[in-house]
Amino acid sequence: MSTRRLTEQVRIVGSGLLGTSIGLGLREHGVDVILGDVSPSSVQLAIDYGAGRPPAAGDAPGLVIVCVPPDVTATVVATELAAYPDALVTDVASVKSAPLQQLRELGADLSRYIGTHPMAGRERGGPIAARADLFIGRPWVIAGHDDITYKRAAPIEDMILDLGAVPIEMTAEEHDQSVALVSHVPQVVASLMAARLIDGTSGAIGLAGQGLRDVTRIAAGDPSLWVQILGANAGPTADVLKKLRTDLDAVIDALDDPEASGARRIIAEAIAAGNTGVARVPGKHGQDRRYSQLVVMVADKPGQLAQLLTDIGEVGVNMEDLRLEHSPGAQIGLAEISVLPEVEQRLVDELELRGWKIAGAFA
């Protein structure tokens, strides 16, 4: 028996990563999902993957979800509001103030519109990268406004909960300021850092470790999409970047003359402030807590990682997080295991007894 909350027929406009993933997730709950896209091949691929069906005569969606690029979001939302006068319409664009303002200017019926934004994605796009579980445990912002009632918008929350996400209410302005800090500026910083690698020698690039990979992981984003996102959220993003520039200028000045009075303090305080900031990033289950890390050497052979995870389970220690790094030029990998600080030493002792080599342990 289905336990789904959403009872409406759903129309999804846009069959990229988000649209197809939403369709896949809702179909698992038995929701009737209609797919539409300006690209016939893209929508057919999403249909082939099972994310929904083509439009048919008699369709009467109660909920329309617009999953198109930010620069056309408002136009498509307005079209859908006019085409389905009884439907609630939402979008999943990564900016919220601009579409809302554009819809006001277009004279759209805002009593049936509310913007949302799932904080989920992948480095790859398109229907082929879609996953039904993409949103599980992820925040999904509902950007409320005064023209729509909470009761009218209830199907949006039903959809979010059915997809396993966590609904979070914000105004459009609060959302845009928040994503500037936690998403848009990190994208710019990652891209700028990765761009410095273009002029790096092969020898320098060969020294790259997990730190560089962590900093630049999201630099593979689609330039055309990010031009739209950053342009639509230019003000909040520029505000954060200006503060970052001030901090960067202070560190540069200190490094230009590290023997000057106070230079080392500036550098130390910059690094310490980073410690404080990263400690605020929610970890597992959204908790603000620090874990201890063990770095275990794993031979690059079939079954070794599986054996390590089995041994950790047999010891009775819960693994909070796992990261893998390959050692350049060596047939080993480094598994960074995060655990609660109170069980760190016991896990080290038990793994060493089982023959594992601990490359490092730190809180």
Image (cartoon, rainbow, N blue to C red):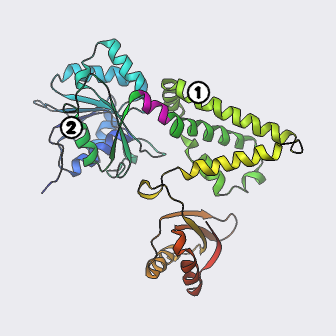
Q: Residue at x 47, y 81 (%)?
A: 315
Above or below: residue 271 compared with residue 351: above
Q: Is residue 60 left or right of residue 287?
A: left
Amino acid type of disc 1? Ala
Q: In which quadrant of the rendered view does residue 41 lie? A: top left
Badge 1 element: helix
Front residue of this view, candidates 231 and 141: 141
Q: Is residue 138 at all visible to an observer of this figure?
A: yes
Q: Residue at x 12, y 57 (%)?
A: 1
Front residue of this view, candidates 105 and 148: 148
Badge 2 element: helix
Q: Is residue 154 left or right of residue 344?
A: left
- Residue receiving disc 1: 238
- Residue receiving disc 2: 155
Residue range in magenta is 173-179
Above or below: residue 193 compared with residue 36: below
